[in-house]
Structures are given as structure tokens and as C-alpha cells.
């Protein structure tokens, strides 16, 4: 028995939709749907995205605190606050472009970045405080900038596994993938 052109087209359309659904399911699994496996590459990309905002805030905070000769604790506090502000802002920028209202974009940014930024801030500020003289070295010294660069590199390396674990469980940057 022959199918009409409409029936044949409908059958091809249904087959295409099933194929798209299977690809979507595979994509969720690869990017870290619930119980999925997140690749190291995905985790590194999420961490690099998070590190961008974190580093902007961290560097700006260290520069402000050092140039104003703030106490180390105040400099660290300013750096942490700015790291969260810039980290969240970068994520919000992307999801706002996807059409989310500001309130929902903020919720997505909080869910996506809070743990990642917190881990990075613990690591990089611990390094800055632990390196003898780094916080008091001044902006014109290699010690300040090398310690800061090392602290951000170490924060990246140690946060990638955290993000991989979170993405594999549908948390962290996995919540942002729905808006890309």
C-alpha cells in the first residue's frame, strides 16, 4: 500500500522530531543533566567563564584595597564582593540576552555561579594572604602580580573538578545551558 505525499512527509517529520529529541537528550547527558556525566572540557569552560568575572572583581578589589592602603581584611572583603558582583553580572548578561526577566536571570546566576565563585574566592584569597608580603607589596611590584596570577591559576585548577561534579548533577553551570 502506498502512502500519500502528505502521509510520507508526516512520517519523515515524526522521524526527524524523534531524532532531534534523542540528540537533545544526548546533549543534556553530555552537558550534565541530572545523573549525567560532565566532561572535563565542559567543566573547564564553565570554570573559565566563572573565573572571568571572578578575576575582574578580584583584581579590581586587590588594586582598590592596595592603592587605598586598606587593611588586608578590608582588601579581601572588597575583592570578594566585587568577584561575586562581576561573576553574577557576566552570567546575567548572557541569560538576559536569551530573554529572561531580570529577577529570573538573577536566580539563574545565583544557582549557576555561587559555589564556583565561593570556591575560587577561598582559594585565591588564601593564596594572596599566605604569600609573605604579597598583600603589602604594592601595585608596582612583581610579587603582587605574580602572587595574584598564581592565586587565580590555582583557583581555576581546583575549581574545575567542583564544577564538573556540580554539572554532572544538573547544578552550577548546567542551569545556564538551558538559555544558550
Image (tube, rainbow, N blue to C red):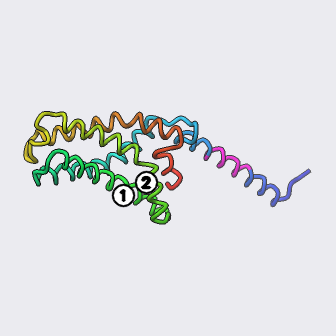
Look at the numbered discs 1 and 2 and tell me whether their residues touch, using CB distance below 8 Å. yes
Task: Determine whether 121 is above or below 98 in the image.
Answer: above
Q: Position of residue 177 (x, y in %)?
A: 50, 50
User: Looking at the image, which residue is at 48% across and 66% down?
Assistant: 101
Element at badge 2?
helix
Mark number displayed over residue 21: none
Left/right placement of residue 142 relative to residue 161 reads left
Q: CA distance from mark 1 to mark 2?
A: 8 Å
Whether the magenta-drawn stretch holds residue 17 is answered as: yes
Quadrant in the picture for residue 122: top left
User: Which SS type dominates the magenta stretch?
Assistant: helix
In terms of sequence position, does the residue under pointer 1 or pointer 2 come before the other? 1
> Of 35 and 42, which appears nearest the observer?
35
Q: Residues within 10 Å of mark 2 (few under 14, many from 20)?
A: many
Q: Which residues are magenta?
A: 15-24
Residue 70 screen position, x and y as percent: 13, 51
Q: Is residue 125 above or below residue 106?
A: above
Q: Residue at x 30, y 43 (%)?
A: 121
Query: Total marks drawn?
Result: 2
Residue at 50% from the left image edge and 63% from the top image edge: 100
Q: Which mark is residue 89?
A: 1
Say which residue appears at 46% left-offset and 46% top-offset: 173
Q: Left or right of 45: which side holds 167? A: right
Q: Position of residue 90 (x, y in %)?
A: 37, 56
Within 10 Å of the Cα at label 1, are there few (<14), some (14-19), or many (20+) other Cα atoms? Answer: some
- Regarding mark 1 in the picture, which secondary structure is present there? helix
Instruction: Determine if the magenta segment contains residue 171.
Output: no
Q: Camera-side residue: 74 or 135?
A: 74
Residue 59: % across, % down: 22, 49
Residue furthest right in the image: 1
Tell me the residue that label 2 is attached to. 109
Amino acid at each position: 500500500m502506498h502512502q500519500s505525499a502528505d502521509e510520507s512527509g508526516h512520517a519523515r517529520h515524526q522521524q526527524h522530531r524523534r531524532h532531534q529529541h534523542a540528540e537533545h537528550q544526548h546533549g543534556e547527558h553530555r552537558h550534565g543533566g541530572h545523573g549525567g556525566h560532565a566532561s572535563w572540557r565542559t567543566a573547564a569552560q564553565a570554570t573559565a567563564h566563572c573565573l572571568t568575572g571572578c578575576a575582574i572583581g578580584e583584581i579590581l578589589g586587590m588594586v582598590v584595597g592596595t592603592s587605598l592602603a586598606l587593611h588586608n581584611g578590608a582588601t579581601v572583603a572588597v575583592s570578594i564582593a566585587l568577584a561575586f558582583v562581576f561573576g553574577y553580572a557576566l552570567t546575567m548578561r548572557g541569560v538576559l540576552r536569551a530573554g529572561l526577566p531580570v529577577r529570573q536571570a538573577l536566580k539563574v546566576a545565583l544557582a549557576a555561579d555561587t559555589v564556583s565563585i565561593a570556591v575560587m574566592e577561598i582559594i585565591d584569597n588564601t593564596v594572596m594572604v599566605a604569600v609573605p608580603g604579597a598583600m603589602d607589596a604594592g601595585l608596582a611590584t612583581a610579587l603582587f602580580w605574580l602572587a595574584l596570577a598564581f592565586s587565580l591559576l590555582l583557583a581555576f585548577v581546583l575549581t574545575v573538578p567542583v564544577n564538573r561534579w556540580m554539572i554532572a548533577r544538573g547544578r552550577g553551570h548546567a542551569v545556564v545551558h538551558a538559555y544558550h
